[in-house]
Amino acid sequence: MNACSTCVTRPEQFLAGWIHASGRSASILCTVTEIPEHLLKRSRERRDAIGQGGDTPSDAAPATAVEKSATATPAAAPPASTGPAPRTAAAEPAAPKPPKPDPHYVVAANQRRKVPFWAMATLSLMPVWGFMYVRAITDSGEVAAGPLAEGAEIYNNCASCHGAGGGGGTGYQFSEGEVLKSFPNIEDQIRYVYYGTEQYNLAGIEIYGNPERDGGPHITGAQGPMPAFGAQLTEYEIVEVICHERYTLGGADPTSDEYAAEFEAWCSADAPVFEAVEAGELSLVDLDEPEEFMVGDDEVVIVNPVGPEPISGTVKGG
Ligand code: HEC
């Protein structure tokens, strides 16, 4: 191979070929491209020295080098170009999203003081307390059974003049024993409510209650007109409301010596006199003379006639 063969790889290869073919002196035309032999030799030696060999071996060396890089490159490349790569690429956009700030009510809820454990324990006992409370109410309701329970309802007809608690108003006060002073005997009170002020005036009865009343007797009409309820309420309803006035408002003690017999006969849950009136077996207004009623096994209670018209009130036991 002569020196000019180097030119073949260059663009002017045609020219070089032409020079060769025409036999012209290459030393003239290829001056620029010609490489001195000693330089070529030195290059060859150098290449040999670094293991790239001469012309023939130099073809193989690059091949192995390429092979090496070819085997090396795929080994390094796959992790970047295959499978996992798209996945990391897809996950990336989600990661940088900044977290949304909590709404103000969530922040407030987090900052609020939590219910302490002891309070939770107390609150959990609320249903038990509610149960006990209802029991307590029910128990006291049993005491108010019978004429007293109904009497409290009927008293709505009287509260406007006598006060819801019997404290008085247009009409007299019942509470603090006041009504008991006027009517030591329950029949006198029944009569008065049945007939009212007007009938007492017509009958000429000046003192409608106890003539020896503590604090002075009550003179008919002195306080104003008390309506008659005989036409508006039944006899047993009048008994019921009077039981309410005497025992609930007036403060009579059902267990005291003074009132135990009356309470048992008239106002208790199974009062025989009340039951007889309620059943229509006994009319207090039509009764001609005193009648005895058995209370319990051995106690006798005398029921005095209310009468067909107003009569004077009586003293205790009269
Ligand atoms: C419109 C008002 C009014 C109403 C309603 C009324 N009263 Fe009277 N009551 C009076 C007045 C006024 C007197 C006093 C009468 C008198 O001075 O003669 C009186 C007196 C009484 C007395 C006598 C008290 C005492 O110590 O001398 C009794 C008992 C009584 N009322 C029961 C009742 C009952 C029971 C009811 C309901 C069913 C009732 N009253 C509704 C006005 C009222």
Image: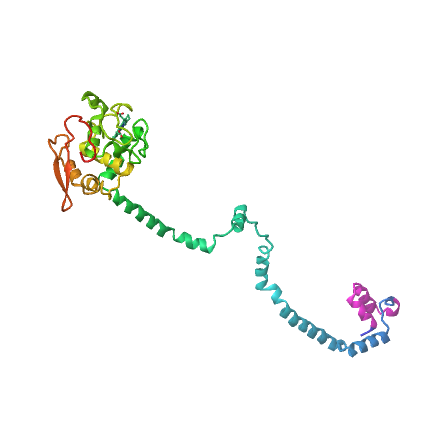
Q: Nearer the viewer, residue 147 or 263?
A: 263
Residue reaching furthest to the right? 28
Residue 139 among magenta residues: no
**Quick one: quadrant of the N terminus?**
bottom right
Give the color scheme: rainbow, by chain, secondary structure or one colour. Answer: rainbow
Give the quarter of the image for residue 244.
Answer: top left
Q: Nearer the viewer, residue 304 or 115?
A: 304
> Which residue corresponds to the image point at 41% horizontal and 52% vertical from the top-left?
123
Q: Nearer the viewer, residue 177 or 121?
A: 177
Give the quarter of the image for residue 140.
Answer: top left
- Region in magenta: 3-28
- Determine if residue 65 is in view: yes
Q: Is residue 138 above or below residue 25?
A: above
Q: Is residue 202 left or right of residue 37?
A: left
Residue 22: x and y in percent read 83, 68
Residue reaching furthest to the left? 288
Q: Quadrant of ligand 1?
A: top left
> Which residue corresponds to the image point at 81% horizontal and 78% vertical from the top-left?
45
Q: Is residue 289 left or right of residue 184?
A: left
> Which residue corresponds to the image point at 73% horizontal and 77% vertical from the top-left?
57
- Determine if residue 281 is in view: no
Give the quarter of the image for residue 304.
Answer: top left
Residue 84: x and y in percent read 57, 63
**Quick one: quadrant of the C terminus?**
top left
Q: Main secondary structure of the magenta part?
A: helix
Residue 201: x and y in percent read 21, 21
Q: Is residue 74 above or below residue 276?
A: below
Q: Number of marks in the image?
A: 0
Residue 229: x and y in percent read 22, 28
Q: Nearer the viewer, residue 237 or 204?
A: 204
Q: Is residue 299 left or right of residue 33?
A: left
